[in-house]
Structures are given as structure tokens and as C-alpha cells.
Amino acid sequence: MPRFLTLADVAEQLQLSAAATYALVRSGELAAIQIGGRGQWRVEETKFEDFIQRRYAATEQLLAESKAAQLPGNKTSADRADI
């Protein structure tokens, strides 16, 4: 894999639209650099891998929190509405 990926490369690998990939860059979630003229963005391979690892970690945390909320004695959001 080359050192830098285009946003089209990233979109293809993540199976996202070009707009969704650009939104990740604009939000700062995916580190990228702008080179040359307008719309010429590149994502370094290591930054792309870092992004993927952060998304895995966030998903694991979300699943762990979801499982913890389902344990006996933990109130669900519907139960909390009665408080």
C-alpha cells in the first residue's frame, strides 16, 4: 500500500460515500492533509490505521456499556423515566 491514500481510496476501503469520507476529515476524526489544488486530500496510511483502531476501541466501549446497562439492577432509560 502506498504511504498516502486519496479520499477515494479511503472511501472504497471503508465502503463509504465520498461525502461521508470528506465529512470524517472535516470533523477531525480522520487526519488528512490538503495538497495542491482544491479538493486534493491525502490520508497517510498510518493515520488511516490509527483511525480504524480508534473506531474499534469506541465500538468495544459502546458494547461494554450496553452490556453493563443490561445487567440486573441497572435501570434502563425507560425505568429512569419513572424517577
Image (cartoon, rainbow, N blue to C red):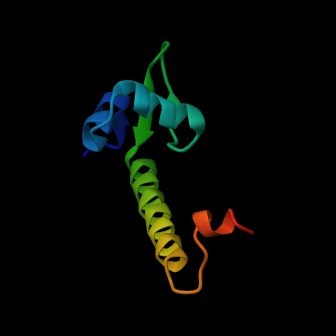
Choose top left, top right, bottom left or bottom right for residue 82.
bottom right
Picture residue at 25% right of the left edge, 36% below the top = 12
Residue at the right extreme of this rendering: 83
Q: Residue furthest front?
A: 82
Above or below, 40 relative to 67: above
Q: Is residue 5 left or right of residue 73?
A: left
Front residue (pair 74, 53): 74
Residue 80, by quadrant, is bottom right
x, y percent for residue 74? 59, 80
Residue at image location 49% in from the left, 70% down from the top: 66
**Quick check: 24 left or right of 12?**
right
Residue furthest bottom in the image:
72
User: Up-down: is 28 above or below 72?
Assistant: above
**Residue shown at 53%/72% (left/top)?**
65
- Percent x, y for residue 52? 40, 55
Q: Is residue 47 above or below residue 79?
A: above
In this view of the protein, which residue sits in the foreground, 32 or 11? 11
Q: Nearer the viewer, residue 62 or 17?
A: 62
Residue 42 at x, y = what percent? Answer: 42, 32
Residue 36: image location, x then y, percent:
48, 17
Q: How many dots with numbers?
A: 0
Q: Nearer the viewer, residue 39 or 71?
A: 71
Q: Quadrant of the C terminus?
A: bottom right
Q: Residue at x 44, y 21 (%)?
A: 40
